[in-house]
Image (cartoon, grey):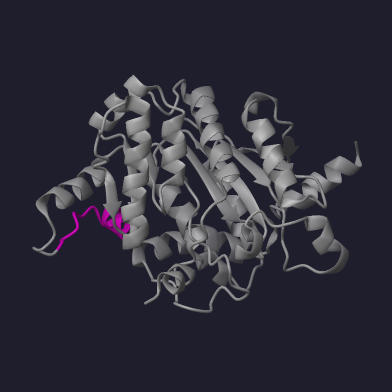
């Protein structure tokens, strides 16, 4: 199959660098703020589960201290998975190039895996080691086992989300992961149905699966995702919003708008899509702080780019705030029983 068709069917859209840069730097800021450690510190174990050509890990590494980076690689604290072979090969080379520039020496990036992160998570749910074919090299099998054993506490990515499709059910049907689907049923779907939603099909899209997977993968730590923003306003999305409030200590949403599935004045207000012609869906950045000692519902923070903004204006805004993350003017969201966050933000702004 042609690579473009395969990437389209897998829901892959390669992420603009300004989004990746902000995500990695804000993740670094939040890990330091909440856990007293930066991404290059010992015991901060980083995973990129949908690595593509390695942009997230490459930019994270560029901001690391060279000596700390070398030690981190030796401890196997940076992991990257990619399901497609050609992007995987490119990812490995790209990350090794960045490592070489930072450290001044060639260090193989051994913790890059050509694998399906969802399938690996199925094994974690089942507490099983994958049974791989005999033809698979022993070194690869060893790395699979080491990743499953790793105490991952930071996950950053742009999960696949059928970005180019008007109908997200067109093309290859999502592969069904039994245990992951069960977890979505127990959380997002049950929440949505209890809140009166009759159609929860959108909660099984791959990007929602990625949120569930990442939530269950880390015991304590941080998730930073570039996402389709459908979950943020949709009725079924109330099930996700309720769960995020219950399962995390803090939730940050940076709304980049760009929903071109709207029309008329509302579409113009959404501004250009940050993915250009790769997507018509709105886009947001989502950061989730998970703490074992959490005792109350999450504090929710929201920020949106200005209305009618061009793509380059949105990129410039991200660039500005990534350099001073402590000064970002987040809007507090007081969630209600309907978990309608955006309506609450609009309502609070009108009272100012």
- To which quarter of the image does residue 232 belong? bottom right
Work out whether 37 lies above or below 50.
Answer: above
Residue 239 is situated, as x and y percent measured from the top left of the image, at 59, 58
Q: Quadrant of the N terminus?
A: bottom left
Residue 335 visible somewhere in the drawing: no
Nearer-the-camera pick, 137 or 215: 137
Nearer-the-camera pick, 313 or 224: 313
Q: Is residue 276 left or right of residue 102?
A: right
The stretch drawn in magenta includes residue 190: no
Residue 41 visible somewhere in the drawing: yes
Image mark count: 0
Q: Quadrant of the C terminus?
A: top right
Nearer-the-camera pick, 222 or 161: 161
Work out whether 159 lies above or below 153.
Answer: below
- To which quarter of the image does residue 219 belong? top left
**Residue sitting at x 34%, y 61%:** 86
Which portion, as a residue range, is magenta? Answer: 119-132
The stretch drawn in magenta includes residue 130: yes
Q: Is residue 83 left or right of residue 154?
A: left
Work out whether 298 lies above or below 273.
Answer: above
Residue 27 is situated, as x and y percent measured from the top left of the image, at 52, 34
Residue 343 is situated, as x and y percent measured from the top left of the image, at 79, 52
Nearer-the-camera pick, 153 or 290: 153
Residue 165 is situated, as x and y percent measured from the top left of the image, at 59, 72
**Residue sitting at x 50%, y 23%:** 32
**Residue sitting at x 32%, y 32%:** 100
């Amino acid at each position: 199959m042609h690579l473009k068709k395969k990437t389209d069917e897998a829901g892959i859209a390669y992420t603009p660098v300004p989004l990746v840069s902000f995500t990695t730097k804000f993740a670094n800021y939040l890990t330091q703020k909440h856990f007293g450690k930066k991404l290059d510190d010992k015991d901060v174990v980083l995973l990129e589960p949908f690595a593509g050509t390695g942009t997230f890990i490459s930019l994270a590494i560029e901001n690391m201290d060279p000596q700390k980076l070398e030690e981190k690689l030796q401890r196997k604290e940076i992991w990257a998975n990619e399901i497609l072979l050609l992007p995987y090969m490119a990812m490995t080379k790209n990350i090794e190039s960045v490592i070489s520039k930072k450290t001044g020496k060639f260090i193989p990036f051994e913790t890059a895996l050509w694998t399906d992160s969802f399938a690996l998570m199925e094994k974690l749910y089942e507490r099983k080691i994958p049974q791989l074919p005999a033809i698979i090299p022993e070194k690869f099998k060893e790395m699979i086992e080491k990743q499953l054993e790793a105490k991952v506490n930071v996950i950053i990515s742009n999960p696949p989300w059928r970005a180019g499709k008007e109908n997200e059910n067109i093309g290859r049907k999502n592969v069904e992961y039994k245990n992951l689907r069960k977890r979505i049923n127990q959380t997002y779907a049950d929440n949505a149905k209890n809140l009166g939603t009759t159609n929860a099909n959108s909660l099984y899209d791959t990007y929602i699966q990625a949120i569930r997977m990442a939530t269950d993968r880390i015991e304590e730590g941080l998730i930073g995702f570039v996402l389709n923003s459908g979950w943020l306003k949709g009725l079924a999305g109330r099930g996700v919003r309720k769960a995020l409030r219950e399962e995390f200590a803090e939730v940050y949403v940076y709304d980049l708008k760009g929903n071109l599935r709207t029309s008329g004045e509302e579409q113009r207000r959404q501004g250009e899509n940050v993915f250009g012609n790769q997507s018509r869906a709105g886009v947001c950045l989502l950061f989730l702080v998970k703490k074992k000692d959490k005792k109350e519902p999450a504090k929710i923070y929201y920020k949106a780019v200005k209305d009618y903004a061009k793509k380059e204006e949105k990129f410039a805004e991200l660039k500005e705030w990534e350099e001073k993350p402590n000064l970002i003017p987040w809007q507090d969201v007081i969630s209600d029983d309907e978990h309608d966050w955006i309506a609450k933000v609009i309502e609070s702004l009108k009272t100012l």
